[in-house]
Image (cartoon, rainbow, N blue to C red):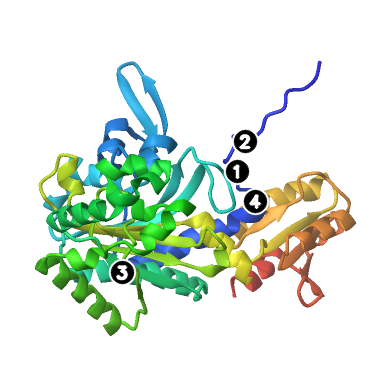
């Protein structure tokens, strides 16, 4: 009878040991830099109620209409989270985090799920890191969020990026602009793509997001949303641009940047990199002053961004940026015979208690094979133990980098390792 064959689901990949160090390095870098910006980590469940995601993102978004993984158990309907802004806001409302005082400056790292066509930099299970600042309507909060986003990429070494910036205004500004946009598009309605025709009545702003070829001539000549901003929205946008300039953060205004979620207001931004090819977006976000109230909280301003970690890693590969050090171990105990193996096993804790990594051969191989394995593991030192060493209590301590060795006692080895 043939053995069954199992594989990962389409668009989902295993992260193997050879790659995991990149991920660990990246995650640790994000956490370290987040502390510099006084951000706190938040973690939410992978599953959320379907209604939360629908209300948060909007029924007409591609994510809700085409891409969510949904399922039911009894009378409860769930989705695997396709993004983390709505779940973070749900946690903010549910746990009354406004009572902690001040703005809640939160960051996250974790997997998301969308049932879309897999391609380079786009998977059905993917990972994002992001920031949500809830409780401030000050343009300074927008700029701090953008500054952290760019800071991470610069820290990694990705500098060939462009920050695109726009304002989509408050609800009144958007309603006025939507009416003007529909009036502009109406004479050419039949020439629009089927997707844009669907969006025309209920969400015409999303037409500006279209990647369909037949829509591009009309998008390029569309009226500008910045011409329809209220005085308050315009002042907010001007302040954001001034603060960015003060921080020497270059930006490129894109009047057709509207982002893909329904909860955005005012500031919208995106960070792109030509090193990613056609899928050039590294990160993006904006202000979402309506979302907290939309899902049951009090009216509360907020701003944030999300960044794809797979795309970041692709950019690093394209640029030859190495994340983290090669796999290595500080000490490899090479043992010859059962007594030596028992000695090695019992003395591994003594080395590890010093905060020094150590390992031992699990297979009982020859000394030659073990030394080859120590080289493969990039071991800094090897301790060679056999019957003679056990009798004399003197062990061969080999510096694998300098190819030097000496015969010394185990306490002396510990002293050398700790210095």
Q: Which mark is residue 8?
A: 2
Q: Which residue is mark 3?
A: 37
**Disc 1 and disc 4 in contact, CB within 8 angstroms:** no
Task: Give the camera-side residue of 229 and 324.
Answer: 229
Taking 389 as reference, is 67 left or right? Answer: left
Q: Which mark is residue 174?
A: none
Residue 128 position in % (x across, y down): 44, 53
Element class at badge 4? helix
**Disc 1 or disc 4, which is closer to the eye?**
1
Cα–Cα gap, marks 1 and 2: 6 Å
Residue 63 position in % (x across, y down): 39, 41
Cα–Cα gap, marks 4 and 3: 31 Å
Taking 96 as reference, is 195 left or right? Answer: right
Q: Is residue 353 visible?
A: no
Which quarter of the picture shows residue 400?
A: bottom right
Q: Is the C terminus in the top left, top right, bottom left or bottom right quadrant? A: bottom right
Tell which circle, 1 or 2, labels the residue nearer the N-terminal end. Answer: 2
Q: Which residue is mark 4?
A: 17
Cα–Cα gap, marks 2 and 3: 38 Å
Tell which circle, 4 or 2, labels the residue nearer the N-terminal end. Answer: 2
Cα–Cα gap, marks 1 and 3: 32 Å
Tell which circle, 2 or 3, labels the residue nearer the N-terminal end. Answer: 2
**Disc 4 or disc 2, which is closer to the eye?**
2
Which quarter of the picture shows residue 304?
A: bottom left
**Disc 4 and disc 2 in contact, CB within 8 angstroms:** no
Taking 102 as reference, is 64 left or right? Answer: right
Task: Give the camera-side residue of 287 and 150.
Answer: 287
Cα–Cα gap, marks 1 and 4: 13 Å
């Amino acid at each position: 009878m043939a053995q069954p064959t199992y594989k990962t689901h389409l668009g989902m990949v295993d992260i193997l040991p050879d790659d995991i160090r990149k991920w660990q390095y990246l995650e640790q870098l994000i956490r370290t830099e987040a502390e510099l910006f006084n951000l706190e980590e938040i973690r939410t469940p992978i599953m959320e109620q379907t209604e939360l995601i629908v209300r948060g993102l909007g029924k007409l978004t591609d994510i809700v209409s085409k891409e969510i993984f949904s399922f039911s158990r009894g009378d409860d309907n769930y989705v695997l989270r396709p993004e983390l802004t709505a779940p973070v806001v749900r946690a903010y409302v549910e746990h009354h985090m406004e009572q902690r005082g001040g703005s809640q400056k939160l960051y996250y790292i974790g997997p998301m799920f969308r049932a879309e066509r897999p391609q380079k930099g786009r998977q059905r299970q993917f990972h994002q890191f992001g920031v949500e600042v809830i409780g401030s309507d000050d343009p300074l909060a927008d700029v701090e969020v953008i500054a952290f986003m760019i800071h991470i990429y610069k820290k990694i070494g990705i500098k060939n990026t462009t920050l695109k910036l726009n304002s989509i205004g408050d609800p009144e500004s958007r309603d006025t602009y939507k009416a003007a946009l529909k009036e502009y598009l109406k004479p050419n309605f039949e020439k629009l793509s089927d997707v844009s025709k669907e969006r025309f009545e209920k969400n015409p702003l999303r037409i500006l997001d279209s990647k369909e070829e037949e829509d591009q001539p009309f998008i390029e000549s569309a009226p500008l949303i910045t011409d329809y901003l209220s005085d308050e929205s315009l002042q907010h946008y001007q302040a954001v641009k001034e603060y960015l300039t003060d921080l020497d953060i270059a930006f490129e205004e894109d009047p057709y940047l509207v982002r893909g979620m329904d909860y955005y207001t005012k500031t919208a931004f995106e960070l792109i990199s030509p090193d990613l090819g056609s899928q050039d977006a590294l990160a993006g976000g904006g202000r979402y002053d309506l979302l907290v109230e939309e899902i049951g909280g009090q009216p509360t301003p907020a701003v944030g961004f999300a960044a794809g970690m797979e795309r970041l890693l692709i950019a690093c590969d394209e640029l030859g940026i190495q994340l983290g050090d090669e796999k290595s171990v500080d000490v490899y105990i090479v043992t010859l015979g059962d007594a030596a193996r028992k000695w090695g096993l019992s003395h591994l804790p003594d080395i590890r208690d010093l905060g020094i990594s150590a390992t031992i051969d699990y297979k009982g191989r020859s000394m030659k094979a073990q030394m080859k394995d120590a080289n493969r593991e990039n071991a800094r030192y090897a301790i060679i133990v056999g019957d003679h060493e056990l009798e004399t209590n003197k062990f061969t301590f080999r510096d694998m980098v300098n190819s030097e060795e000496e015969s010394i006692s185990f306490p002396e080895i510990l002293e050398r390792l700790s210095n």
